[in-house]
Amino acid sequence: MIFFSVYLLLVIILSLIFKKKSMFLNYSGDIHQSFSNKKNVPLSGGIFMLIPIVFFLNDLFINCFIISIYLVGFFSDRKIITSPKKRFLIQCVLILLFVIIFDLRINSSRIELFDLFLNNKIFAILFSTFCLLILINGSNFIDGLNGLLISYTIIVFFILTKLNLIDNSIISNQLINQIIFLLLLLLLLNIFNVLMLGDSGAYLLGFFMGFVIISSHINNNDISPYFFISLIWYPCFENLFSILRKLNREFSPLKPDSKHLHQLIFFFFTKKFNFELILTNNFSSGIICFFNFLIIYISSLNPSSTIFQIKLITISIIFYIVSYMFLFNFYKLNLISKK
């Protein structure tokens, strides 16, 4: 505990140094990066997350994959891997190998017909790979406002530990608790624009969260698989919805844009209130996090009931779509009036 406390202090000191020396900047000229923040902020959150995970996990092979996923994001942040297609292809290979080596197959969907497919090893491997890819990239998508992804991850880990669902044979409760404390510190630093996660931090958190959730699902057969979907419905649906939305506009799903839900919420509050940019950023993020906390907390009240979880997911998706339609219409009307 003393070592970890010293590490938290070191994170604060290094973050302030990186900020002052303008190190690991985010090159916020891209539209999807600069819509809510015009300042260059160090993308150091990922490395601060990587160090304790690798140090305390004590599994060489898992750590190799965690570091590899982090490096894909790091090279993206440094503009070394600029092609979204190349990043996605590398992710596909890494995640597929990870699922095969550690046999991270989803056991059951509690839908008889779909379970017949899951009984096929190849299909099960591909499906788990698909789920992890959706979560990793969905996590990166929602990391557009200060604290949004960090707060979401804190909520998920808190609920998993509260229900004692963590697979302790791989990941200890102590590690998860330390990750939560570290995330709280990173959240504070992120809110005040001292650091950001960047692609490296978003990929890392999405991958680690997915690994923890699938491991928890495999070792808790009495818990409905849809409870675990409830935990990550937002980043996953954000990704799937974004893919369909971009395909409908004949726009590449792999290319970033500024039409995600959190971006429209930010635009709405920017037009409605004359807040400072950082205040609107944090306020918009807080609204989304509060809603997701309610959804995830309600899901934790009856985690074994598939019907309960499906109803909750359905309500969440309907609310998302209705909100998106309203906000997108508001966005279009304001652009027209501006012209």
Image (spheres, rainbow, N blue to C red):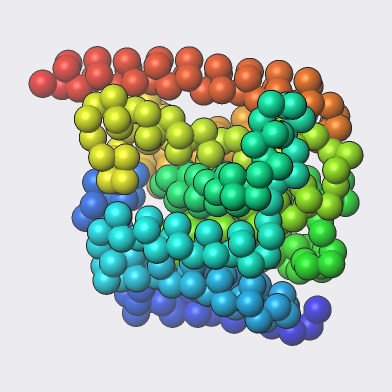
What residue sits 70% from the left and 78% below the top?
59
Q: Is residue 126 left or right of residue 155?
A: left
Q: Position of residue 201 (x, y in %)?
A: 49, 63
Q: Position of residue 12 (x, y in %)?
A: 56, 74
Look at the image and tell me whether residue 3 can be seen. Answer: yes
- The front one of 80 and 99 is 99
Q: Position of residue 325 (x, y in %)?
A: 40, 16
Q: Is residue 261 left or right of residue 267?
A: right
- The front one of 299 and 102 is 102
Q: Specify the quadrant that holds the C terminus.
A: top left
Q: Is 170 rendered above or below residue 60?
A: above
The image quadrant that residue 172 belongs to is bottom right
Q: Position of residue 211 (x, y in %)?
A: 66, 57
What residue sits 33% from the left and 65% below the top?
76
What residue sits 78% from the left and 22% below the top?
308
The image quadrant that residue 309 belongs to is top right
What residue sits 56% from the left and 70% below the top?
66
Q: Is residue 333 left or right of residue 66?
A: left
Look at the image and tell me whether residue 294 can be seen. Answer: no
- The front one of 58 and 140 is 58
**Count of numbered badges drawn on the protein:** 0
Q: Specify the quadrant that holds the N terminus.
A: bottom right
- The front one of 283 and 69 is 69
